[in-house]
Amino acid sequence: MSEKKVIEVIETKSEPVEAFDRVKGFWEKFSRPIIYVGSAIILLIAGWFAYNELVVAPNEQKASELIFPAENLFAKMASGGFNKDSVNIALNGGELEGKKVTGLLKVINQYGSTDAGNRAKYMVGASYLHIGEFEKAIKYLGDFDGNGASQIQSKAYILLGHAYAEQKKTSEALSNYKKAASVNDKDEFFAADALLIAAAYAESTGNSKEAISLYEEVKTKYPSNVAVQNGEIDKNLARLGEIK
């Protein structure tokens, strides 16, 4: 082998050696922080699994058991009417028919981050609305998250609209009525009813242009709605001067 070829071979072999040296140098320089970061990530993942298994799941179970009596009481009030005595028990706890009821406010305080705690926020907001505590109703209904359940979220926005309307906050009330319709505009029943509420509210507060727009939206999007079919919307539009 000529001297030239020997040099070429040596030069060719030196490239991976130099690359290895560079990697080795990098590892020697950064191995400690890399190990620390990797260990931290592993610990975070392990901690997340442990938290879900040891904290979240048991808390969900405890909260569900705790809220059950108050949830039943709220369901009875929703179908039979709200009164201050029943609302007080639902909110603050007490005894009903010889059974202990844990107050919804306590459930929120202890397990507010659970699904049961989230449901409690809706029930607390609705209860406050029915006894005229509008600011509190807004607080708890605003904290409630439907988590993809469009019908209950739509209802929450409508209740928020009512609370704002009672405070004569017209723009906030109308905004929430319209939100109720937009949660799932393919839901012909809830979306159309929310739009009709928004339209009636806009009309009652002298916002005729907005009312006309909302009534027209119901006609366009939900032609099978009862208010469209029985001519009620056309009567409302005619009353507002919109005659076709």
Image: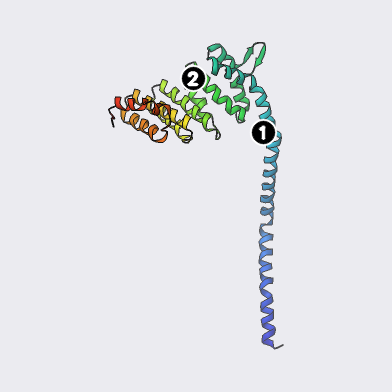
Q: Secondary structure at mark 2?
A: helix
Circle 1: residue type: Val
Q: Nearer the viewer, residue 117 or 22?
A: 117
Q: What SS does tag 1 mark?
A: helix
* Residue 176 in sight here: no
The answer to whether 71 appears left or right of 126 in the picture is right
- Identified at 37% across, 31% down, the residue is 214
For label 1, the residue is 56
**Residue 28 sits above or below residue 70 on the image:** below
Q: Which mark is residue 129?
A: 2
Q: Position of residue 221 (x, y in %)?
A: 41, 35
Q: Quadrant of residue 100?
A: top right
Which residue is more in the foreground, 104 or 96?
Answer: 96
Q: Earlier in the sequence, mark 2 or mark 1?
A: 1
Classify mark 2: residues with Cα within 10 Å, few (<14), some (14-19) or many (20+): many
Q: What x and y, as percent, mark residue 92? A: 59, 17
Instruction: Check disc 1: other Cα within 10 Å, few if <14, some if 14-19, many if 20+.
Output: some
Kindly report which numbered mark, 2 or 1, lies closer to the viewer in this rendering: 2
Q: Residue at x 42, y 27 (%)?
A: 226
Color scheme of the displayed model: rainbow
Nearer to me, 118 or 244: 244
Q: Amino acid at mark 2?
A: Leu
Q: Is residue 191 above or below residue 87?
A: below
Q: Quadrant of the C terminus?
A: top left
